Image (cartoon, rainbow, N blue to C red):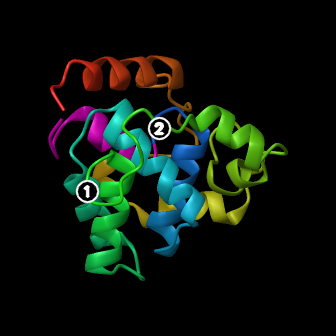
Amino acid sequence: EDASSAKFTAWKTGRTGLEFIDAAMRELYVTGTMHNRGRMIVASYLTKHLMTHWRLGQAWFEDCLIDWDPASNAMGWQWAAGSGPDAAPYFRVFNPETQIEKFDPDRRYRKMWIAEGQAHPPPSAQHYFEAVPRSWGLSAQSAYPAPIVSAKDGREIALSSYKTRDF
């Protein structure tokens, strides 16, 4: 995938259809911050489920994070992608659905950042639509998207791709 692909655009705009990914990406865009758990999951999803080069994610983080650091972010992205000197094994593919069950079972994080589908979304979820460029054409009244790549299918895509490489 490249920076103009529909999948990369869905990832960076918080419209992947996977709650944890979208909540984290929206928090990033509104606040300029993201918890480390979110960083690992969105990086794994981008590089493994969407098979997108880690440098595209690193560049987006550079644009959005207020605590961006050239060295730690490059290393973090390489770790998540399964490359670099201290990388997670290629077969470590975070499942965003099980991660949200484990770390946000009450869906507080999801409700805080995703307005779609809520009768009375909190201000934090609405701030996202105020913050994004109008050219994105997003609205809190829009339907929440279906997953662009399911957690299961993305894992299978990644593992299949890595197995065919000659490491």
Residue 133 visible somewhere in the drawing: no
- The residue at which mark 1 appears reads as 84
Dot 1 crowding, Cα within 10 Å, few <14, some 14–19, many 20+: some
- Which residue sits at x=78%, y=50%? 120
Q: Amino acid at mark 1?
A: Gly
Name the quadrant of the N terminus.
Answer: top left
The kind of residue on which mark 2 rests is: Arg
Q: Are marks 1 and 2 in contact (CB under 8 Å)?
A: no
Helix, strand or loop at label 2? It is loop
Whether residue 157 appears in magenta in the rendering, the answer is no
104 or 126: nearer the viewer: 104
| Residue 75 in view in this figure | yes
Residue 31, how many percent across, how many down? 52, 74
Name the residue at 63% across, 33% down: 97
In primary-sequence order, the first of circles 1 and 2 is 1
The image shows residue 137, relative to residue 134, as above or below, that is: above
Quadrant for the C terminus, please.
Answer: top left
Q: Quick check: is 2 in the magenta stretch?
A: yes
Task: Report whether 165 appears left or right of 131.
Answer: left
- Residue 132: x percent and y percent? 39, 60
> Which disc, if any, is residue 92?
2
Q: Position of residue 69 (x, y in %)?
A: 32, 81
Q: Is residue 64 left or right of residue 165?
A: right
**Considering only vertical position in the picture, is 63 above or below 22?**
below
The part of the chain drawn in magenta is 1-14
Q: Is residue 141 above or below residue 30?
A: above
Residue 76 placement, left or right of 123: left
* Residue 157 to residue 45: above or below: above
